[in-house]
Structures are given as structure tokens and as C-alpha cells.
Amino acid sequence: MNNKMIIKLSQLIITLFIFVSSFNNAIAVELITWDRTPIKISINQNDERMVILERNISVGLPASLQDKLRVQSLGGVIYLKSNAPFTETRLMLKDLETGEIILVDLTGNGPSKKKLETIKITTDNESEANLKKAEENYTTVHDEQVLPTPVLLTRYAAQNYYAPLRAIEKVPGIKQISMSLPPLLTRLVPQLPITAEPKSVWRLKNYEVVAIKLVNHSKGYVNLDARLLQGNFYSATFQHNTLGPKGEPTDTTMLYIVTKGKVINAFLPELSKGREE
């Protein structure tokens, strides 16, 4: 797998637009550039706010917020939701690829009817030309949220496997399609002692996402790294980054792979029995 095929979730997220309608309220995304100054963000009680980044991020949550703040990270988007107000508290966002730390000073407000904008954090000054070129990658949901289409697909696939039916978001345009992949993807990650079983495929615009069940067949823990995946993919997101030993409840997780075009064309062909690569 060459450098061009290395899966970096940061490639999922590019700068969002501000859409304005003369008859409806503007759907806005607040763009913030990380310049080594702590970024101040506020959230309203019981109202989820999204923070979109250009990188695969883990969140360091202080003990003081454990019972007040819910943090979820999926497909390059961080979802923040509080159940109680709290004073300004510092979070550490760590880039899992480079180790770089982004500092966020988060404040939890009380309940409010005002919907806070989604935040996009970037470290690059992207040009007008790049913004226009990226427009096709975005989808509007319920006339409120504007997200990159690959992010929507990843989130939708994850909800189908880890969320109750009532919580699955209805996204206009997403269709489940027939799966023409083999029962097992033996060449997806041959370096690891796991099986990869494709389960479902969904399509939105010119992207597709396939949900793949990963099972550990060894007695030890297995760390999952998207850079080991073999194929031509747009993005890849693990539901969990580590698999527990065989037989443990944690020995199984899901992988969501997004492709531009048909998924069948993105995977290496399976080798015939008795034939070596």
C-alpha cells in the first residue's frame, strides 16, 4: 500500500460552506484556525454541538467533566453534549497521526433555544478555488446540518450497528444497495490475525460505504491501524481501535470504509485457492 493509499481521516474533512437562503435562516459553520492559542468553545445544556477537524483526533476528558459531558468521536467529527452547566475547562485534542495537541477551552452553558453553529477547526488557509471544488462532497440533512457526504455515510453505517432503531438518523438520499463483495476479504488486512466479513453497503451521491465485521482469532490484543488496510479507499473508520482476545466480548468490532464510486472496485481481488500472489 503506497503513501497515496494511506487512510487518513483528516482527508474526510475539508472546509465547510455558509449557505444562505432568502427565505430560511442561514445554515452556518464557524471556521476557526488553530494558531497555538486555546480555542474557546461553548455548548448549551442538552444540545449536541459538532466540532469538525481535518485530522483523526482523540479527546482527553478531565475527571471534573466525566459526569457532565458526553464526548463521541466518529468519522472525523467530535460530538459534544452536556447534561449540566460547567465553568471553562480545558480539553486536549490529540492528533493520532502526528501527536500534535490542540487545546480547547470548553464552557457549558445552561439550556437555550438558540442552536449553536457547527465548528470547523483547521490549520490551513484554504483557497476559494478549493472550497468550490469541494462543494460536491457535502450533504444537507433536515435543512439544519451540513456535513461532508463521506462523514454522513460513516455515521449512518455506525448507527445501524451500534444505535437503537429509533436513533437511526433519516438521511435523504442514502440507499442500501446489494453487496457484490466476497464473503470474506482475506486481502484487506493480511498482516493481522483477524477475519473481515462485509455486512452491508449504502450509497449517497457518488460515494459508497461498506460495513465490515472484524473478529480477532488470536489470544492476544490486536491494535487496528488504517494504514495496514490494502485497497483504494477514500476513508476508513474503526468503531473501536483495539480488539480483545478471542472469546472475549471485545474480540469483535466494525470497520466502515468509504469509497468514491463502487466499493467492489476498491478492494484487491481475492486469490484463487492454491494460487499465491
Image (cartoon, helix red, strand yellow):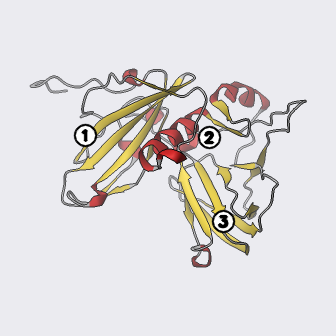
Q: Position of residue 210 (x, y in %)?
A: 41, 33
**According to the image, label 2 marks what residue?**
13
* Mark 1–mark 3 distance (CA, rounded to whole Å): 41 Å
Looking at the rendered structure, the secondary structure element under dot 2 is loop
For mark 1, what is the residue?
190
Q: Residues within 10 Å of mark 1 (few under 14, many from 20)?
A: some
Answer yes or no: is residue 221 visible: no
Mark 3 sits on what residue?
82
| 155 shown above or below 87 | above
Residue 39 sits in which quadrant?
A: bottom right
Q: Secondary structure at mark 3?
A: strand
Q: Earlier in the sequence, mark 3 or mark 2?
A: 2
Q: Badges 1 and 2: C-beta atoms under 8 Å apart?
A: no
Looking at marks 1 and 2 on the same chain, the residue that comes earlier in the sequence is marked by 2
* 107 vs 221: above or below: below
Residue at horizontal 39%, vertical 49%? 225
Name the residue rendered at 59%, 64% in the picture. Answer: 70
Q: Nearer the viewer, residue 49 or 133?
A: 49
Quarter containing the C terminus = top left
**Residue 81's quadrant in the figure?**
bottom right
